Image (cartoon, rainbow, N blue to C red):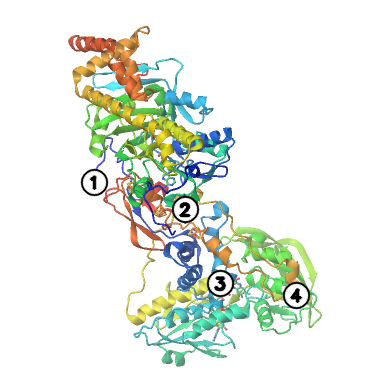
Amino acid sequence: MARTDRPTASEQSFLTRAQQLEQRPPCQVGCPNSGDVRGWLGIIAQRRKHGLSLEQAYSAAWNQLVELNPFPATIGRICPHPCESRCTRASKDGAVAINDLERFLGDWAIAHELALPHSRDRRCVESIGVIGSGPAGLSFAYQMARRGYRVSVYEKNATPGGMLRHAIPEYRLPRSVVEAEIQRVFDLGVSLQDGVNLSEDMQDLRERHSLLFLGLGAQRPRRLDIPGDSLVGVVSGIDYLARRKQGKSTKLGASVLVIGGGNTAIDAARTARRDGAAVTLLYRRSRQEMPAAAAEVDDAIDEGVRFLFLVAPTEVLGDGKKVTGLDYQHMRLGAPDEQGRRRPTPVKGETGRLAADSIIVAISQQPDWHDDGWLKTREDGRLANDLWAGGDDTGPGIASRAVAQGRLAAQSAHAQLRGETPLGAPSVAVDVDTGKVRTDFYDERRRHARSRLPPKERLERPEDEVDRTIDSRQASEEASRCMSCGLCFDCQQCVMYCNAGGFSRLENTTTGHYFELALDVCEGCGKCVELCPCGYLTARQSRD
Amino acid sequence: MGSAHGSFQQLAAEPESAKTLRDGSRIAVVGAGPSGSMFSYFLLNMAEATSLQLNVDLFEPRRFCHRGPAGCNHCGGVISESLVQRLATEGIVLPDEVVQRGIESYTLHMDIGDVEICTPLEERRIAAVYRGNGPRDSEPMESESFDGYLQRLAVDKGANLVQRLVTDVSREGDRMRLECADGFHDEYELVVLASGINSRLTADLEERAGGFRKPAPTKAFICEFKLGREVIRETLGPSMHVFLLDIPRLEFAALIPKGEYTTLALLGDDIDEELMQRFFTSPEVKNCFPGGKIPDHVCHCYPRMNISGARPPYADRMVMIGDCGTTRLFKDGIGAAYRAAKAAARAAVFHGVAAEDFEAHYWPMCRSVQVDNRFGKLLFAVAGLIQKARFARRGVLRMTITEQRHPGKPKRMSGVLWDLFSGSARYREVFMRTLHPAYIKDLVWNLVAGNVDRSHPPAVERRHGTH
Ligand SMILES: Cc1cc2nc3c(=O)[nH]c(=O)nc-3n(C[C@H](O)[C@H](O)[C@H](O)COP(=O)(O)OP(=O)(O)OC[C@H]3O[C@@H](n4cnc5c(N)ncnc54)[C@H](O)[C@@H]3O)c2cc1C
Ligand SMILES: Cc1cc2nc3c(=O)[nH]c(=O)nc-3n(C[C@H](O)[C@H](O)[C@H](O)COP(=O)(O)OP(=O)(O)OC[C@H]3O[C@@H](n4cnc5c(N)ncnc54)[C@H](O)[C@@H]3O)c2cc1C
Ligand code: SF4
Ligand code: SF4
Ligand code: SF4
């Protein structure tokens, strides 16, 4: 049957030959940790094809998920989910609720006491030191420990977890969730020494361990640097949040100003509302430029936080000892800066004044390590031959990025210890062309609606989580909304419609892999390429 | 799952009365090509007339709004005049958005010359349609898919469109069980297979359940060229161009103008690249295109055509219609789908859904088509002989040209060719006409005249000049 790819008399080929080509889906491109979202969603969505019960599928999906991210219940609560913004389904009937599903699986695994995977590779005996127990350090620790290394974590706080445990408010991320997920890492045999504030001189540690990882985070809050900024009543956002997280009392007074536009500012403002204060947040650019997640800004508004945009503080007012108010300057947006954000410039003569009992300053944090700020690592996280780093100490980021950097550093460190070449480019090199995904093939099914605490109740029950975890029915339905961009999901159109009989079912099918395509049988009609809803089948370049 | 796949032929011992459609009966129609959609339409129409309330699930994974092969049931898209009229009497009037261009004539191309054959009755028009939403690399068009239009008629009549791919049909006690690729399954009192021949379903069912023989396919070829309306008006005109060329295994080749595009369809015995090569290099073909050059195509496929029907095309609670049952040889497949849909719907509503009901009230229609196809085979064999023999081609050309030049003259050859190309008449009827003494007399005269009087070859007779 095989025919040569010779052009016809009209100097053109009437052959469009098909090939199976796994491609990287947009959700994975969007995920800072390159999460194999399609993979773990597929396990749930295609479970019946492999004879898995729902419970078995959840368990298998969680196991796949924690390959890259050991904290799904945590990240599933706080991640701004850039994966979803890219999801191909967004243009149809709403992105797949990846974050909610991640959270569901995380909670499910906690409830079912699933343990992290652990290989007992006897070759990996070296001792590894990790400084800092935030998501970056713990991700590194996990990836090394599961390979068999002996890992010690050093932490200056009394409890591990970094910002997850000490800054992010309870109503978004309960301590119990973070603790449960962190405990699993220590269950792999990782040891913890808390209450040790390590200095830059790590000679002692370098001798004790084969290599070290720095996951220090960015602990030093930036100051306002305006007159009056050291008056009593001026506090930093992370200090305020940390005290609240520890259950310590914080006397803010009735009227609070928050300065900043990032996560910390929003969290501080919302927490202060829960403390009963009237809160105004001042930001020097407009809402559009705010680094904080848009949904959280909405939540803050719902909870009664007032926003003043395009204003910059000029002086903290006080009665000699304590804060009484703030003078500010109106701004306008000028030309874009290096990052493309428009730079605010003062509007001459336009100023204002607000009275306040406290001022929370949340205008970003920096590493508390040495004076030149961020650590500058190579791409794989390497600082020196025996020193790796990752997370917020290399630049401000989100938790998922910290987890990713800890993981990548571990891969690189492991390769060095074992004398292997580090992992090359990811196995799936081509990104899905979303224009080729036939979204209209899939049934119209709206994204599930989140169940949330109404704003009024949030203030009455300040410790209660705002968002609830979806239930099992929602989870299985939501997982089956995934269109499996770039990987077969067994719709069987190709095998049904290929006239040449090019497709045959694999004897052992697995998630994403169902058919074999006999390239020599293909007669080049190109029909399957057009039909394949997910874009897995693509046209082969002719004459190969 | 439970029950084993039994032969479709095995008859359960049960009272005859149980195998009729009643109020609330559930019917699954697999495939919403012309046969499936028309079946659903007729069934619901007849049920309505007899105050019977039926639930029809029409399964079709294809989206006819897609351009290219994904949204298309691959065919030349010529709707014969008899079908256009018959549909009109059913109240199905093809709207302008569906008809790409009314075809007013056929132009016959041979190595010795061309002739244009006008419609036998002036007011008759043939419709050219797109089965899907037009060629792969085309711009979105304001046109509508023919199959999509029929599907909508069925849905408007009350059929419930299920956008799923059926993977298995089996017997489950006294009902039919149907399974889909996504795990969906359900049971029905009647399953109507209308999945065509470009689908593996009947082959899979034959393999799994047995008890019937699937239709046999042969490979055809279709492609689309974008020429633009202007060029089409100048070169092809509102005419379908048919080629009688001496290429082995090629039974029929036609260029069908449709709006900005023109469809090329090659039918025969397993069209392959060698055949295509010969076709595209023949001057008769090249001359139909501007500058004598074949332009780049914007879509192509190698669809299958039915060369023998399913046997038997029915079982208890199951009936096969259209291309996956019995269809006409080479021509008017959609017309055949219409007849099968109607006959099967009538059998199911007025008689019953047991194998015997279909045997008594559906099979006769299939058999008559199969008998007629034998005449068709004969006619195409004769046409093949003419293609091979130059002297015969001269006779045919001369006779046709003479008929076309003299409006009063009986159109014996023109009529035969017209009906052969359009599939408007039964093959048997066409064949009988070729046995008419007047036809034979005329043909013999033209054979002689056409081959003796070679110094004056008949002028090329066409209204739309080619380059
Ligand atoms: C208020 C707030 C809200 C946030 N909200 C979100 C959110 O919604 N979503 C999101 O994805 N991200 C959020 N982030 C960001 C996220 O928390 C960080 O990106 C992430 O925690 C960084 O992880 P890390 O491991 O690099 O650092 P950290 O989490 O800061 O952990 C560093 C750890 O190292 C320890 N350490 C530092 N120096 C030393 C030393 N010398 N010796 C010993 N131990 C040391 C620290 O005590 C700390 O435990 C938020 C951050 C804040 C502050
Ligand atoms: C090259 C060529 C040219 C032709 N030219 C003409 C012409 O000009 N005029 C003419 O009248 N006829 C022509 N025909 C014949 C015509 O195409 C067919 O006879 C006609 O399409 C038959 O209609 P159908 O409904 O039986 O099948 P189809 O049109 O094939 O429709 C079958 C439907 O079933 C669906 N289906 C298949 N498998 C499944 C499944 N497993 N589950 C659910 N749905 C399924 C398919 O998606 C499809 O929509 C031509 C045929 C060929 C090959
Ligand atoms: S549909 Fe699925 S695979 Fe595609 S981007 Fe969304 S989550 Fe990823
Ligand atoms: S449908 Fe079959 S013959 Fe056509 S391109 Fe795909 S594999 Fe090849
Ligand atoms: S058409 Fe369907 S079964 Fe075939 S490769 Fe694509 S997704 Fe898989």
Rendered view: A397 above or below B2 = below
Asked if residue B139 is positioned above or below residue A420 in the image, the reply reads above
Instruction: Examine the rendered structure and indicate whether residue A308 appears above or below residue A132.
Output: above
Which numbered circle lies on residue A75? 3
Same chain check for tags 3 and 2: yes
Inspect the image, locate mark 4, and give the three-letter code of the amino acid beneath it: Val
Kindly tell me whether mark 2's CB lies below 8 Å from ligand 3.
Answer: yes
Asked whether the residues under the numbered discs 4 and 3 touch, taking CB atoms below 8 Å apart as contact, a structural biologist would say: no
- Coordinates of residue B328 in the picture (x, y in percent): 35, 31
Judge: label 3 CB < 8 Å from ligand 1: yes
Is residue A155 visible in the rendered structure shown here?
A: yes
Q: Which residue is mark 1?
A: A1
- Tag on residue A316? 4
Label 4 environment density (alpha carbons within 10 Å; few <14, some 14–19, many ≥20): many
Percent of width and height locating residue B63? 48, 44
Percent of width and height locating residue A29: 47, 62
